[in-house]
C-alpha cells in the first residue's frame, strides 16, 4: 500500500465515531512502521474524529504487538487519564494494559480505569472492565479486587458489562490457572 497521504489526512474523513480509514492506517503502518509516530501524534489532534480513529487504529495494532508503542507509554497513560473523548477512552482502556507496565504504572492505569466506570458510555465502562482484568496479568495483587468488581458488574451493570464480566470471570477464575505471587500471568493465552 503506497500512499503519500499523511496519517492525519487518512483519518480525517468521516463522522466522529466512525472507523473511517482506520483499517487502512493499520495496514499502512504494518508495511511502514516508521509512520507509527504520525499515528500516535494524531491521538492529540484537535479534531475529535481524527483522535478517535487514531485511537481505534492504535488499539487494533496493539492486539498484535503492543511493544511497538512501549516508547509512548508515559504519554499514553497521561492521555488516558486526561481525555474526555469516549472512543479514545475505550480504545486506550483496551490498549494500555497490553503495554509492559511496572506495578506503579499498573496502579495508575487502574485508577483511571476505575474512573471510566463512571463514564456515561456503556462501551467505555465495558472496556474499562476488560482493561482492569488485563492488568491482573502484570499486577496479580489486584486480582481479588477485580474479580469482585466483575461479579458486581455481572449482576448490576449494563447488558454489555454483564456479558463481558461473565466472559472475563471465566478466564480469571479458571481453576487450572496457577496464581503465583508477583509473577506475570498469561490469563488470555
Image (cartoon, rainbow, N blue to C red):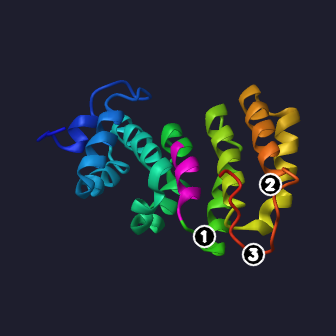
Vertical arrangement, residue 24 with respect to residue 136, above or below: above
Secondary structure of residue under mark 2: helix
Above or below — where is 78 with respect to 92? below
- For the point 71% across and 29% down, the residue is 160
Q: Give the range drawn in magenta.
A: 91-99
Looking at the image, is mark 3 or mark 2 earlier in the sequence?
2
Query: Mark 3 or 2, which is nearer the eye?
Result: 3
Query: Which mark identifies residue 146?
Result: 2
Q: Mark 1 points at which residue?
A: 105
Residue at image point 52% right, 44% down: 91
Is label 3 in contact with label 2 (beta carbons under 8 Å)? no
Q: Distance between the residues labelled 2 and 1?
A: 16 Å
Looking at the rendered image, the disc whose residue lies closer to the viewer, 3 or 1, is 3
- Specify whether 42 is left or right of 152: left
Label 1 sits on a secondary structure element that is: helix
Residue placed farthest to the left in the image? Answer: 4
Q: Which mark is residue 182?
A: 3
Crowd rating for badge 3 (residues with CA inside 10 Å; few <14, some 14–19, many 20+): few
Query: In the drawing, does residue 156 fall left or right of residue 70?
Result: right
Amino acid at each position: 500500500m503506497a500512499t503519500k497521504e499523511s496519517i492525519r489526512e487518512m483519518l480525517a474523513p468521516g463522522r466522529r465515531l466512525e472507523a473511517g480509514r482506520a483499517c487502512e492506517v493499520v495496514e499502512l503502518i504494518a508495511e511502514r512502521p516508521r509512520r507509527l509516530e504520525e499515528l500516535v501524534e494524531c491521538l492529540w489532534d484537535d479534531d475529535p474524529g481524527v483522535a478517535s480513529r487514531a485511537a481505534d487504529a492504535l488499539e487494533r495494532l496493539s492486539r498484535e504487538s503492543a511493544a511497538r508503542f512501549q516508547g509512548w507509554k508515559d504519554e499514553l497513560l497521561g492521555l488516558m487519564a486526561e481525555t474526555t473523548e469516549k472512543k479514545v477512552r475505550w480504545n486506550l482502556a483496551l490498549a494500555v494494559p497490553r503495554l509492559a507496565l511496572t506495578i506503579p504504572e499498573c496502579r495508575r492505569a487502574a485508577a483511571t480505569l476505575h474512573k471510566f466506570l463512571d463514564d456515561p458510555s456503556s462501551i467505555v465502562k465495558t472496556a474499562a472492565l476488560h482493561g482492569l482484568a488485563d492488568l491482573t496479568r502484570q499486577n496479580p495483587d489486584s486480582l481479588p479486587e477485580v474479580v469482585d468488581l466483575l461479579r458486581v458488574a455481572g449482576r448490576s451493570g449494563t447488558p454489555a458489562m454483564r456479558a463481558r464480566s461473565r466472559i472475563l470471570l471465566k478466564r480469571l477464575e479458571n481453576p487450572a490457572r496457577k496464581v503465583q505471587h508477583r509473577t506475570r500471568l498469561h490469563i488470555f493465552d
